[in-house]
Image (spheres, helix red, strand yellow):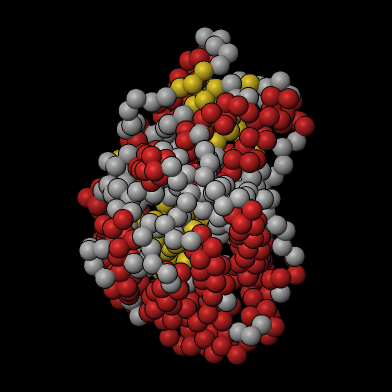
Amino acid sequence: MNVLLIYPLFPKSFWSFEKTLELIGRKAMLPPLGLITVAAILPQTWDFRLRDRNVEAISEADWDWAELIILSGMIVQKGDLLDQVREAKRRGKKVAVGGPYATALSHEVEAAGADYMVLDEGEITAPMLVAALEQGVESGKFRATEKPDVTSTPIPRFDLLDLEAYSEMAVQFSRGCPFQCEFCDIIVLYGRKPRTKEPEQIIAELESLYELGWRRSIFMVDDNFIGNKRNVKRMLRVLIPWMEERGYPFTLSTEASVDLAKDQELLDLMTAAGFGAVFLGIETPDEDSLAVTKKFQNTRDPLSDSVHKIISSGIRVMAGFIIGFDGEKTGAGQRIVDFVEKTTIPTAIYSMLQALPDTALWHRLEKEGRLRGESANINQTTLMNFVPTRPLAEIAREYVDGFMQLYDPLCFLERTYRHYRILGAAPCHAERRRKAKGKPKGKQSVDWRGLQALAIICWRQGVVRKTRLRFWVYLAQMLIHNRGGVPSYLGVCAQIEHFLEYRESVKQNIEAQLEEFLAAEAAYPETDVLPQPEVAAVPEAIAS
């Protein structure tokens, strides 16, 4: 069987980082881990080709070669995924689709013409597809009645990837999250009982990447890395000596809940294993909103203290924030901005609340008659897909104003600098520097692309923009106080090259949709249907 694995395009989003990736010569942030895991589950007598459309186009030779097309993607990728299903069917190919989007909204994929719906988790449903194909079954929908034991999950087919195309690599340790946040679809897709791989599995996956020559960042894509703290600690105690023996070939990052701050032993194990960054779902500093959405884990300790504890332990914090919760009071957007500034979080993903299919929020709003459609678009450039409890126009304007403030180049630079000064004082970094003293340095090749990126950053942020004075002052202070953190610091500084353009896209799209909404509301006061216009183009020159 010749199997063509297709990963759909991502639209421009907070995480797409096009301009930042251009600087370092990469084409995408992360690879399609789900597809290469499915490739490892399917019969290894089959031949596979992977075409990540964020990296390369599908050629006529690829289409001609393929006997079966397999696609997977998230809701945000739905537009291109459906286009590729239709294109495959136009060419007379059999098509199988799985992943989060197909699992949540299978009727949309079926309507596009998919033959096989391989839903839920592939360890259970991919073998069902194989059996159906062997029996000559022409179509089918395969569902799991239980959650798979991920200790049986094989090493993903990393060899199918063009490693040079990606900024970071993806590895998964666990699935599921123990919490009950109303808006989150992770517990719907993967359950509330975190399932973890064995430490030896993670080591085998990292060893595979090491043998393939990977030496850059690895993102542990768990939705809550610390959902099962006992098993995480077991894994970290095995990972630490493996990383030490190889001279820390990777830098690691992940996603976790804020209660990470309450476990210093876990923080110390993570930094000892090479974890340098974590993404936290903070959502809002408003405790009433956190209670409404059942994110109780964020109300047990002062959020700002928790963030500072993680940073001062040596782990850079990225965080997610949401505006538009029920019962939210005026000024929520500015309170988020003030919290981000206070806690020095450089990378703060900021969105209006969206109701995702089959979540507790979705079902509650459906019961209350407040949903505005049968689907969802979770990009940051669309209005909310339900009727909020305060005026939509007020929420949208606070959102746009907050986005513009957060990614003002000078504000972003100052936050990043203050963040790295706290990081630099962390005991784990002082210990790492002590161990590194006196060790002979191996021969290193010149990273010309990195030098070019550095030159562009220095020119744009140190000469052209209003950051010109602070950029050099902060860089000098970093060289004095946190020399080892300078490469990472400059890497985060480079993110503004993406955000400067993206915030204009957010502003244009939200304001255009809001204007259309208000006009429709004035003409037809009884309607609450939101417009869904095409994403507006943003001039290339904005970033400079």
Q: Residue at 42% across / 57% down in the picture?
A: 389
Residue 403 showing in the rendered view: no
Residue 141 pos. (x, y %): 49, 21
Farthest-out residue, top: 135
Tell me the residue at 64%/53% (across/down). Answer: 523
**Coordinates of residue 345 in the picture (x, y in percent):** 43, 72
Q: Residue at x 52, y 9 (%)?
A: 135
Q: Viewer-proximal residue, 269 or 243?
A: 269
Q: Within the image, what quadrant is residue 463 found in?
A: bottom right
Instruction: Say which quadrant the C terminus sits in.
Output: bottom right
Name the one closer to the observer, 24 or 319.
319
The image shows a total of numbered marks equal to 0
Could you tell me residue 221's position as x and y percent? 43, 50
User: Residue 472 appears in which quarter of the rendering?
Assistant: bottom right
The residue at 64%/85% (across/down) is 466
Against 523, residue 438 (above or below) is below
> Is 35 left or right of 83, judged from the image as shown?
left
Closest to the observer: 235 or 464?
464
Vertical relation: 413 (above or below) 287: below
- In which quadrant is the N terminus drawn? top right
From the viewer's perspective, is 112 left or right of 261? right
Q: Position of residue 245 (x, y in %)?
A: 37, 58
Please determine whether, in this image, residue 506 is positioned above or below residue 141: below
Can residue 140 be seen from the camera position used here?
yes
